Amino acid sequence: MASKKVPSFEYALCMACGSCLPACPFGCLSLSKQGLDRYRTAFPRLDRPESCTGCALCAKACPVDCIGLVAASDLVERKKENS
Amino acid sequence: MKACMGKILRVDLEKRSFEEEIIPEETWLGYLGGVGLAASLLYDAIPAGADPLGPDNVLCFSSGLLTGTGAVMAGRWMVACKSPLTGGWGDANCGGNLSPAIKQCGWDAILFRGIASEPLVFIADAKGPGLEAAGELWGMDAIATEEAILSRHAGGKLPAVAAIGPAAERLSLISGISNDLGRYAARSGVGAVMGSKRLKALVLKGNRPIPCADPAAVKALSKAYSDKVRRQNLPGLMKGRFLPVLGKIMGGKQVLPLDGIMSAGIMKRWGTIYNNLAGAVNGDSPMRNWGGSVAEFGARHYGKLDPDRIVKRETRKYHCYSCVIGCGGVVDVSDIMPGISHSHKPEYETACTFGALCMNDDLETIYRCNEICNRSGLDTISAGGTMAFAIECFENGILTKADTGGLELRWGDGKAMVALLELMAARKGLGDLLADGVKKAAERIGRGSERYAMHAGGQEPGMHDARLDPMMGVSFSADPTPGRHTISASVYYNVSHVWEGVPWAPKSTKIYPKGEEYEATEREADKSVAGTCLKQVLDAAGGCLFAVATGTQHWRIFDYLDAATGVKRSREDYMDAARRIQTLRQLFNVKQGLSPRDSIMPQRMAGEPPLETGPLAGIRVPIKAMVSNYWRRFGWDPETGVPLPETLAAYGLPPRPAFQAAKLEVE
Ligand code: SF4
Ligand code: SF4
Ligand code: SF4
């Protein structure tokens, strides 16, 4: 069976705009990832992977296309490189 | 047309009934959405002479046309009704997270009429709309209410919540509606209207897709704008204490054309509180109830309001839905107010109204006042304006300790301010008399107190001095929601680039002498009109004013609208829709029996008599002549402000909606 897909965030591009949050029908995401920049910005993360169906609605809603769907086993949280 | 859901929901709180209606295509084309949709619906729905706190008033929550389409900076919702403060058109908007939730429930607007027999909560989810008893939520503060509701949904998708606090339950005319734990649609007394309907909260949890005609084009615009914002970062060496220099440049004798995108760096760093210092030195910040100047509230005082001190308390940045700037912040104030669970960083408006306006330089007082307002539901601008009025009355012997219950209301006395604000929030003692804003307070006190009541048509003005920016004074005086600082002003206009594609909007691309802004010329009037129209498009789209402040050459609102709706229109066409919206808002006031002349701001605010000290010393604003020009350029009678018949005919006003009633779908 193929590994389940889950969202992975490209934090260097993410604007912390929160558009992905209400797009998720199951409330899997939260703005709880901090420490990636100097502003104390709260970035999104997959909070409840067990509820994620891999539907990609979050990725569709992202205005800057910084969410990719990856195999859950490949999920690593990448660092934000700018600012 | 795409971008909208195409339907609204009407809720009758008395009958506990729901009715969906399809909005015809012409309405979208003519009124766009957001504020325009609300105006097109409420003009007919609210009868002339309706009691603003009675069953006939209609409270309309509407989403923005761009919300949820992939556009950034477009997540603001609008609430509109007849205002109990002004007796005319009332509206307020807020970022937070409610705007997409309205659409995800399947509607562009939700309208409430009637008065419930008991306190209720409106809930919409996959099962459709419903009403539940508010129970123990009634009486709770606005933030605790939302926390309680959210805790019931833990472990799944969280709803978006709009709630009122106890001040609105007690019908304080200066109360607003909270969303996302203390972001506010604060103005026009919208909270009192919700309180009068016994509607404690809206709980929205939908999952419908929001249509967009050309998602790729919308995303391309969002990516280009986000790239620009991402690059705007102030150097670490730029400290808050240098902001007075920026303030001096902004208030200089020559006005320089600046690229608005630079404001993104300032907003990312500090948010609106950057103006605590910048506005103090150039006169933008009103002091001592609009009668003082920086000569009395100098660096020793305003320096204590350094935004770096406030940002140090931020535990995280706060972005409204779809915002790529993030001017907000959540602050830790638990050392000042133990046990406080969540507190939004005070905005500049709040810091000024409880700061310079009351001659207070104590930040702790500002945090406390911010918290009391956000929890009880009081509008900070109006509460601070009313407090400054009360202090001035006390200082001049119109109010005495017998009236205040022993409080010494002196300029800058933070303890007395907090005590008075608590009384206002609880409607106790003198607080009961003040809880309905300055106009009502002056009527109740009498004894010559009217001369200290700084309001325009009943609304306490925002914290920006028209003696520095006369166009701001035109908005304070002539907008159908008077006293509003977010409509149009030179400081917004000059960076807006609205003139690109709108030939009648005067260009502002070259250095010019500041003195021009004080002349009641056609050019200045056209700037006011164009700025106002841009703001109507913005409020129809659900956009943030701080996006416009970065410039529409960067945040391309008109291109966004074309791409999201799939209807390609000229910019002039959009601005024409804005004229229709603004004229209809004005017509609403006329229908409700208001005389537009009565909302012209008080003489003191226009420099009669002029200030004797500070950067605005000696300045007078010819406000009546400027307002008259503005009315004329809108096609309204230059003497009365009433829209002329030919203008109404040109815009097809008043609207005659031909709604098609649709059956309520239950999923
Ligand atoms: S992929 Fe679907 S279920 Fe998973 S987080 Fe994104 S929107 Fe939610
Ligand atoms: S929608 Fe995209 S840019 Fe916005 S917070 Fe989510 S991942 Fe980041
Ligand atoms: S700039 Fe500030 S007010 Fe505007 S949307 Fe962003 S966070 Fe909200």
Image (tube, helix red, strand yellow):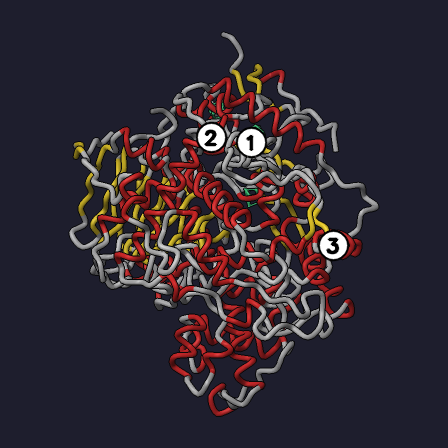
Identify the residue at the far front of this view: B521
| Residue B517 placement (x, y as % from top left) | 61, 54
**Tags 3 and 1 both on a single chain:** yes
Q: Nearer the viewer, residue B447 or B616?
A: B616
Chain of the residue under label 1: B
Residue topped by disc 2: B571
Residue topped by disc 1: B500
| In the depicted structure, whether residue B662 falls above or below residue B426 | above
Disc 1 to disc 2, how far (Cα)? 8 Å
Residue topped by disc 3: B308
> Of the residues tagged 2 and 3, which is closer to the observer?
2
Q: Residue at x 44, y 59 (%)?
A: B482
Disc 3 residue type (three-letter): Asp
- Check disc 3 and report its element: helix, strand or loop: helix
Image side of residue B376 versus residue B292, left or right? left
Label 1: few (<14), some (14–19) or many (≥20) C-alpha neighbours in 10 Å: some
| Residue B270 placement (x, y as % from top left) | 68, 49
Q: Are marks 3 and 1 in contact (CB under 8 Å)?
A: no
Q: Are marks 1 and 2 in contact (CB under 8 Å)?
A: yes
